[in-house]
Image (cartoon, grey):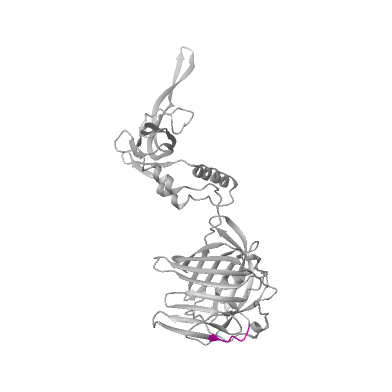
Amino acid sequence: MKFYALVLAVSLLSSAAFCQKTVAPGSKDINTKYLKPEKSLYTVYYVKDTSWTKQGSLTYDIAVANNQLSLTNSYTPKDNSRTSARTSVADSQTLKPISYTSDGKDSKLNLDFAETVTGNYYSKKTKKDKKLKLHPKEAYIDWNWMDHFICTLPLDVGYKARIPQFYYNNESDILIEYYTIKEVKSFSFNSPRTGKHDTWLVTVSEEATGGIYNYVVDKKDHRLWQREMSMGKGMWEITVNEELDYQPIKSTFNKELSVQQISKGNSVIIGTAYARSSSGKRLGGLVNTAKKQYAPKGTEITLFPNSDYYEEWIEVNKKIRKQKKMPEVPLTSDFGYAVKKSKVYDDQGHFEFADLMPGNYIVMASFDFSNSYNYSYVSGYTNYYNYWGYTGSSTNYGTARQSYIDKANIEKRVTIDKDGDKKEVSLKE
């Protein structure tokens, strides 16, 4: 992403920069097989020290047709106030630019790339068009491809290159700017969804300003995991891949059907939530003797329709916990729309749900309760004597009762057979 306000340091370029090879469209270093037709989503943050502030979302959409690659880059701020879109078309083998269009907050731009670049610039502030005829002096990539261009290169420890990038700025006559790959080194990237990945950490310098970009690129498939852009004064813009293709659960969640199931019927579920007397710990081999403990008044009871999706979600996470290699899979964000809540309304653990359609449901509760058990202990000894002296002793035992706080976590499957049924259930541990 171009960032013209970036000012870190302006210094003379070292002669070493000009000794490095230039990688432009047609270079043998470019391998476009890594540019897969797909949509990817990144979350954009401003980061300083340990503070991460979400700014918005960035979507890349790559398509292939007629030996051309099309990249649409769309940015939406966190307040959803507007979406800025840019589309670049390039040759599918060489990445030689063909066309570029953008529609931003302040302007629109259309370019057709050839020996002479032609197009139109429209200012939304002045309401004026400007016809363009531009004459770049060397081969270049369109700047909109830069993040993905890095991923096409034969990255390895010690790899270096200079990349000429075309960028039109209505307030500047400079058309081509160079970016230098300063360093490539191995890096371990930890995804919150799929765990650790072996990656390349690619450090790129914008030669005109000294601005720094860091790219985290997967060693196997050259996926872009993360991009960091220096903004000065310790601030960084960091975009993080949200892994839209990560779908370990094959079953789909039907949001509309699930919402109807908990709101469009005439059936009810009533019940009682409690911890039974045989629940809890068995300390010292002695049986718990506490009486039935009802869920306290106000305890939240949860209900949702059971489904193939939910059952598969349970099984997938069981395997993940067993393997201990990656984080568990969260429920889809739509799942919450089909969750119904109720509360225990008295001191006997009673609750109720209404407006349910026929089907299978999961009812859950979690609450603390007081538990207790009886135990015996040695209270002393009785010694016996006769005329000749000590003849033996017996052990005296006492009994006592001990209390402790336990937690009940209860889940029950309930089936409603026909509309209008009234189902009574006991949630007991």
Magenta: main secondary structure equals: loop
**Is 208 rendered above or below residue 104?**
below
Position in image of residue 242 (x %, y %) = 52, 60
In-front residue for pair 260/272: 260
Residue 219 seen: yes
| Left or right, 362 with reference to 318 | left
- The outermost residue toward the right is 28
What residue sits 53% from the left and 44% below the top? 312
Q: Which residues are magenta?
A: 133-138
**390 above or below 8?**
above
The residue at the far top in this view is: 387
Please say if 311 is above or below 110: above
Number of dots carrying numbers = 0
Q: Nearer the viewer, residue 144 or 47?
A: 144
Asked if residue 137 lies left or right of residue 365, the reply is right
Residue 49 appears in the picture as rendered = no
Q: Where residue 359 sits in the image (x, y, percent)?
A: 43, 37
**Outermost residue toward the left in this view:** 346
Q: Examine the image and state in which quarter residue 66 appears.
A: bottom right
Q: Is 396 colored magenta in this rendering? A: no
- Looking at the rendering, in which quadrant would you find the C terminus? top left
Give x and y (percent) for residue 129: 44, 83
Work out whether 76 lies above or below 139.
above
Side of 172 where 297 appears, left or right: left
Is 286 displayed left or right of 163 in the figure? Answer: left
Give the residue displayed 46% in from the left and 19% down from the top. Answer: 394
Residue 137: percent from the left, percent from the top? 61, 86
